[in-house]
Image (tube, helix red, strand yellow):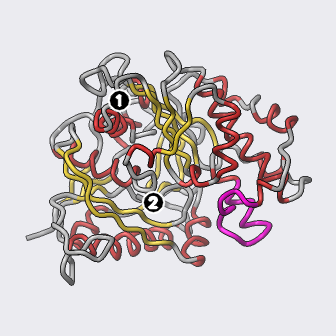
Amino acid sequence: MSGTSLDGVDAAMILTDGEVISEFGGTAFRPYSPKEQAQLRAALGQWSDGAQVPAAQEVVETAHAALLSRFTGAGTSARNGEGETAPKPRLIGFHGQTLAHDPYGLQGAPRTHQTGDGALMAELLQTPVVWDFRSADVELGGQGAPLAPFFHFACAKYIEATAPVAFLNLGGVGNLTYVDPTKTQPDDDGALLAFDTGPANAPVNDLMMARRNLPFDENGGCAACGHPSADIVLKFLTHPYFHKMPPKSLDRDDFEDLPAMVASLSDEDAAATLIACAAAAVARGLEHAPKPPKTIFVTGGGRKNFIFMKYLRNEINVDVADIDTTGLNGDMLEAQAFAFLAVRVARGLPTSCPSTTGVAASVGGGTISKPSE
């Protein structure tokens, strides 16, 4: 998985039938170099015919192939992220890199763009690859995002949750999944509700890059020295997105006016304000939950920003916990999700439903590419 934070590629193995998680396997991470990050940033917002897309696609494919070859043993013996001999995967879920996302058709027909050729990856890795997970959902009237909720449902079962819980992923964009683990299947009525909450780490990352040439605000150190602007947070919450009912989703740069809103603030106050906006967006999103979840489990890089976690706890009236406390891996949940979804695609099971993406009916997306004989 390569997410909107553009920090690098996560890889994770799981043993599953696409319904029950039997075992979690090895993990690995391959960071993008500053040059590679710059190439990806240059292609953001572009569709397949964009001038910077070929270079971005090469970055994505090269990084994924290099990392995944550790697991497939392409050119060497298969080893996991810890360097130990590992079983070779029977199937790979390859998400690619989201460069543009327009589920409302504001630029024409609704569409979404993840760069990266899964057929090429299948040849390079000599392993079947499931890819292009989102297109079918969008073509059938869905948002194409978020797609992790069916995996979150399985995670709730795995940790033996007995009351409704929520999974909050704080990547470049924030997304929330409300899970009722008393239901049998993820597309049962009332089992799931999912949507993007708003911007999360992306605006802060962009701020740090623009002002300090740093990829992110490590552990919230910059924001910790600042004071958020309540006026800017209130203005932020007037954005039309917050008046839409879920399911709903965002492009990484849909809140393009945020940088200008904090332009006159110091680095510290700007970072604190952007995090306060993201936390307020989560609180606003929780108003759509059928009832308050028992716990909100936070995943993604944002959970390591103690200021972000502090602001969330100030805004939200339920328990907010780092998902690592459950034994799950908050750094690898998204990568694990697409491995899980790949198996569902291979088995002909749905990967999204009306309550997760707004699609008309439960649908299984994804294309399966096999290496040539």
Please identify the dominant SS of the magenta region: helix
Q: Which residue is mark 1?
A: 161
Q: Which residue is mark 2?
A: 2
Residue 158 % position (x, y) = 28, 38
State which quadrant residue 43 falls in. Answer: bottom right
The stretch drawn in magenta includes residue 213: yes
Q: Is residue 281 left or right of residue 358?
A: right
The C terminus sits in image quarter: bottom left
Q: Residue at x 19, y 51 (%)?
A: 15
Q: Mark 2 falls on what kind of element? A: loop
The three-letter amino acid code for the residue at tag 2 is Ser
Compared with 279, 57 (above or below) is below
Q: Residue at x 83, y 50 (%)?
A: 260
Q: Is residue 217 left or right of residue 337?
A: right
User: In whole angstroms, how far apart are the C-alphas of marks 2 and 1?
Assistant: 28 Å
**Region of the chain picked out in magenta, as a range:** 204-221
